[in-house]
Amino acid sequence: MNNKDCDSVALAAVNKARLCNEHLGRYMIRAIMAGFYIVVATILSNMTAAVLLSTYPQWGKLLSSFLFAIAIILVVFMNGELFTGNNFVMAMGAYKKKVSVKDMVKVWCLSYIGNFIGAFILAALFVYSGVSHGILTDYYNSFIYGKLDISALQLVIRGMMCNFLVCLAVFTGTKLKSESGKLIIMFFVIMTFVLSGFEHCVANMGTFSIAYMLLGNIGTAAVAKSMIFVTIGNILGGGVLFGLPLYLSELDK
């Protein structure tokens, strides 16, 4: 870890703020596409778990956790604008005084909105395509209500742990030269958060959208509570739990 590492992150924050301020349409497309990528991984992960639910549920959970890593890989390699990654990048830019707090919050808000639009659109297309409604309905009934019955404190902590791991995977990947090395580290670190049951707000946008369309009203207040506290946790996990120690570790260099 050296000064150049955090400087490169801060430069990325500057570029994100500039794109957001000068080319809003392009920025929103990238944010919407990131929502698409997350739901692609959600579909793959959910279908795998659903197929194995009645026969090998433990293997289904393990395999679906591993496969969800494709979400972050798609975002990184396709230059998507993901809210959770931006929590770390923009916070580092603000710590190093390369971007303003206003720009940081603006990027966070617009990427969050774009991610939701993308996640909702692809979730709707998936559900209304009519594929595998039976097994998906059974699968969602098996976990969605438990997911909504988590305390606010636990949601925040799970959100923090999730984005700590997501940002760790992405940041570590940037330090590796080979594409295969990046893929390996991302797969296993992302698998850690999914298998552990930590909470990712953008993944939940897709999950709750699919659940609403498959099962009907699953509880608007419970969904809103989950989204709010997981989002807070993701911000703290990326911007504080991961980003702040990296910044502080450079101050005496």
Image: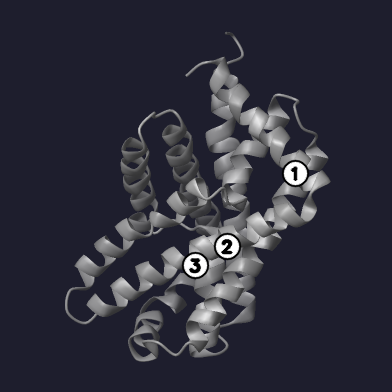
Disc 2 packing (10 Å; few <14; some 14–19; many ≥20) = many
At label 2, which amino acid type do we have?
Answer: Gly
Q: Earlier in the sequence, mark 1 or mark 2?
A: 1
Residue at point 52% right, 53% down? 159
Can you identify the residue that label 3 sits on? 39
Q: Please determine whether, in this image, residue 93 is positioned above or below residue 152.
A: above
Camera-side mark, 3 or 1? 1
Query: Is the C-beta separation of discs 3 and 2 under 8 Å?
Result: yes
Q: Position of residue 4 (x, y in %)?
A: 56, 18
Residue at point 49% right, 89% down? 215
Picture colour scheme: one colour
At label 1, which amino acid type do we have?
Answer: Leu
Q: Nearer the viewer, residue 247 or 180?
A: 180
Q: CA distance from mark 3 to mark 2?
A: 6 Å
Residue placed farthest to the top in the image?
Answer: 253
Q: Nearer the viewer, residue 49 or 7?
A: 7
Can you identify the residue that label 1 sits on? 19
At label 3, which amino acid type do we have?
Answer: Val
Camera-side mark, 1 or 2? 1
Can you identify the residue that label 2 sits on? 35
